[in-house]
Image (cartoon, coloured by chain):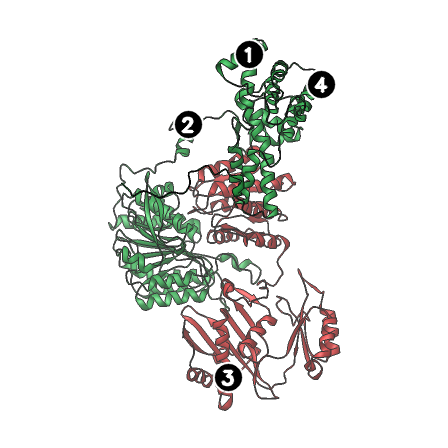
Amino acid sequence: MAKVLEGPGMGLMKKWGIHVPHYAVVTSADELSKLGHVNEWMKQTKLVVKAHEALGSRFKLGLVKVGLDLNSAVAATKEMIGRQVGSITISQVIVSEMVPHKEEYYCAVKSTREGSEILVANCGGIEVESNWERVKRLCLDVGQGPSPEQLEKLAKDAGFTGSIAKKMADFAGKMFACFDNEDAQYLEVNPVVTRESDGELVALDAVTLLDGDAKFRHPDWNFQFAAEFGRAYSKDEVAVMAVDSKIKGSVKFIEIPGGDTAMLPAGGGASVYYSDAVVARGGKLANYAEYSGDPPDWAVEVLTEKVCSLPGIKNIIVGGAIANFTDVKKTFGGIINGFRKAKGDGKLKGVKIWVRRGGPREKEGLDAMRALKDEGFDIHVFDRNTPLTDIVDKALQK
Amino acid sequence: MSILANKDTRVVIQGGAAGVNAARRMAEFCYLIKRPLNVEAFVYPPDAGKTNEIPYGSGLIAIPIYKTIAEATKHHPTINTSLVYIGADRAMKGGMEALDDSHIKVVSMITEGVPEKDAKLLGAHARKLGKVFNGPSSIGIISAGACRLGVIGGAFDNLVLSKLYREGSFGVITKSGGLSNEIIWICSQFADGITTAIGIGGDAYPGTDYVSYLEMFEHDPQTKAVVIVGEMGGDLEERAAEWYGAKKRRVKLIGVVSGFCQESLPKGMKFGHAGAKEGMKGEGSARSKSDALKKSGALVPATFGALGPAIKETYQDLLKSGQVKEPIEPAVLPRLPKSIEEAMKADEVMVAPLIRTTISDDRGDEPCYDGYPASELINKGYEIPHVIGLLWDKRLISKQEAEIIKRIMMLSADHGPCVSGAYATILAACAGIGLSQAVAAGLIMIGPRFGGAVTDAGRWFKYAVDNMMGVDEFLAYMKKNVGPVPGIGHRVKSLRNPDKRVKELVGYVKSLHIKTPCLDFALAVEQVTAAKKDNLILNVDGTMAAVLVDLGFPVDSLNGFFILSRTIGLIGHWVDQKRQDSRLIRLFDYLVNYAAPKRREVPPLK
């Protein structure tokens, strides 16, 4: 699932015929004042300025300013750009026109197992969140599109009447077209408003989640996907992602500040069971990591170095199930090299290492790990006869 | 019994290298259970018409490759299952092609990163046709003692350790590929092993869910209990719980779910497989899934570690109630033949080597010449002549010897375009022939009349010196037994028009005040022969030969010095012609003496 920021999200909606306010994404106040010279709407309407970053609660952080004229918008932009919020530096703001309106509505399309679901409500904003029963749904099987009659019925079910029902049906149809053609997994507009000037429905806000796996058939997706957890990726995370994009198999790494148990397990399934075991034992995760699909040893070595660099760690869990085709000796070779490098750099002092694994060439791999004891590592090695997560129990025994 | 994959399963594999690897793993399993290979064909358009060689035991089986599924099933009408190993961007087309073939009932997709919409379309299409679409991102399906689809089950040793050669009583359904193997192992250690294990893939919307397979297991009398390994995200585990709780089921259900760590993670942070995402309102969390399973009456161990004991407990109950009996293990199991390398490593075989070498070895991280690492030679100041000394005569020559060799090579690197070697290379270059062939054409000219007299000259001068012959005695011997003295005589040079190269080399070697018996003898021979005829001088071949013999090089290596140094010139000529983009050349008629018979009538054929 790949999150897309508001600007490119609005761009995709516009592409499929949905009315959106005039907007521009700028990286400096100067850029905005230059744009103000040539864009009439910036002078004629009140403006909204929002930080254009993957941040939650922007309103509370003072990163949304409304009802501004161009000069105030330039000032607001100046104030926002460069601001540091946690690990994120705000580098872009989105400036859009205020659309005068009275009524607010809600429309979304989401992915379901059978296909998709179109959601419509005749209330919007925070009102819809507290009145979820007013949201009406139209379920569609995959490969099937909504008919105009179905859409109109949906709008009427949701309480729309007269000409606005037809407009809402049309709006929802366009939302579905955008969802279906752009390989979206979730599209939400809240609120949808009636523009006072011409009575058209306009999308004031866009939540857009796309299917990152479908990027190969969307050459016009020229935007970056945003981190989904409310902070920017760290340097080490970006480094591991760069390795991941180059190799057969995969390596993954996410830091969790403040933890003391470092994770270096194999497999997307087993890695979560290991994390669960740490939490269940009262440990604090210092990271999430995973390598799978028989990655090259150098990639695992890079991952190992990053894991060893986590501050304040006491244990490293090198866990894994019985691999199908990942070569245990080869991937452990990468981990061993990483450990040696880290030790050479003065890291791993007082850190205990716990190993459990099975799979092709497990004996050779585990023997090589055991041999690290002779090099002064505090390492504890177990084979398939020790249940998967028992090393976590041993590591975190009080 | 088993579900989905059984002894009648015949397979087509769609895809290239990954598919071939899977076929190898499948052949190992077929060998273990003493059944013929279940892979009938591959579909891979780039290699259509060829075959893939799949090792089976100690032999190889050729499996044909077709362009389309239709061709494969036409030639192999028993095919009923397809494994898809095609890249994510073409996987849907391949999967649809397989589903649409009337022979094929089960399609399992291994491809990862397939767009969600494509996976849903494939799943919906399969349901419409009443077929099974498993995956994407599936590690495979394995039925113990009957059929393996994909790499599930791992290496051969693991197949044996996990007792996959015979049926057990437990069904397994997992999203994770790695954990499928772990559960198979656990079932074999804590109970009597598995019937069928299925990897459904970790995507958000797998083509077939737990419920469909639970229904199949429910109808398979051999399967007494099913283990499902869930992950947070989606609602597949809840649906499984709903199915189990809906009415009394014959099979026991044991389930674990991962993702409890989510509760203590920063908001929005997600781990694991693509499908592991929580719903907007907290549905799909590990806790809600785990609770749903418990409520349905399933056995839900608190942790993954408690799964083994839970399976054991279930197995003991089944034994007690007489529903299962202790399995009988086969006395002997086939062992996978080792490769020669593995067998040698284990000291199990002795191999008579085909060739023997005494000069170099590149099996380490760099080549060693007569034992010396190349980089160390470089770093300690050794040069090309020393490498020649090591590889041709297995000894580290001195600085002085190296200098002589260097000079010999510099003097004989080229001799203009008109000599046989260079001319042949130029002719070839002008005919558009490539570098190695054109240079080889030049090298082929080196023989008794051009450049190839060094070895012979050295041999006879050495013979004379070794036998302490006088010049006259030597010349008489040569006249009687050999013919003209190799190394003596030149086509154009003479006493009055001496060869500067010879003068240079002789002058340098003499200036070193080293012992040069061969060179001295050769020069003495020249005194006599040149007196008889002006051009019977010691030529450059003879000079090189005498000097190199004096340096101790073996006679058989001597032509090598000319071949090596002249190769420098030949390469130069080829590059030179290439650079000029020279045109094809042919002899002019006036350069040929046409001495063939005049044109005449052909008599009738008799």
Q: Which chain gets the red colouring?
A: A
The answer to whether B191 appears left or right of A152 in the picture is left
Q: Which residue is mark 1?
A: B474
Vertical arrangement, residue B151 with respect to residue A218, above or below: above
Work out whether residue A283 can be spotted.
yes
Same-subunit check for callouts 4 and 2: yes
Q: Which residue is mark 3?
A: A168
Chain letter of disc 3?
Answer: A
Q: Which mark is nearer the camera, 4 or 1?
A: 1
Split into 4 quadrants, where in the image is the C terminus of chain A? top right
Give the CA separation, mark 3 to mark 2. Answer: 82 Å
Q: Which residue is mark 4?
A: B511
Q: Amino acid at mark 2?
A: Pro
Same-subunit check for callouts 3 and 2: no
Give the CA separation, mark 3 to mark 1. Answer: 115 Å
Give the CA separation, mark 3 to mark 4. Answer: 105 Å
Q: Which mark is nearer the camera, 3 or 4?
A: 4
The image position of residue B41, as x and y in percent, is 32, 52
**Lower position in the chain sequence, tag 2 or tag 1:** 2
Based on the displayed image, in which of its 4 quarters is residue B330 positioned? Answer: top left
Q: Amino acid at mark 3?
A: Met
Q: Which residue is mark 2?
A: B353
The image position of residue B17, as x and y in percent, is 42, 50
Q: Which mark is nearer the camera, 2 or 1?
A: 1
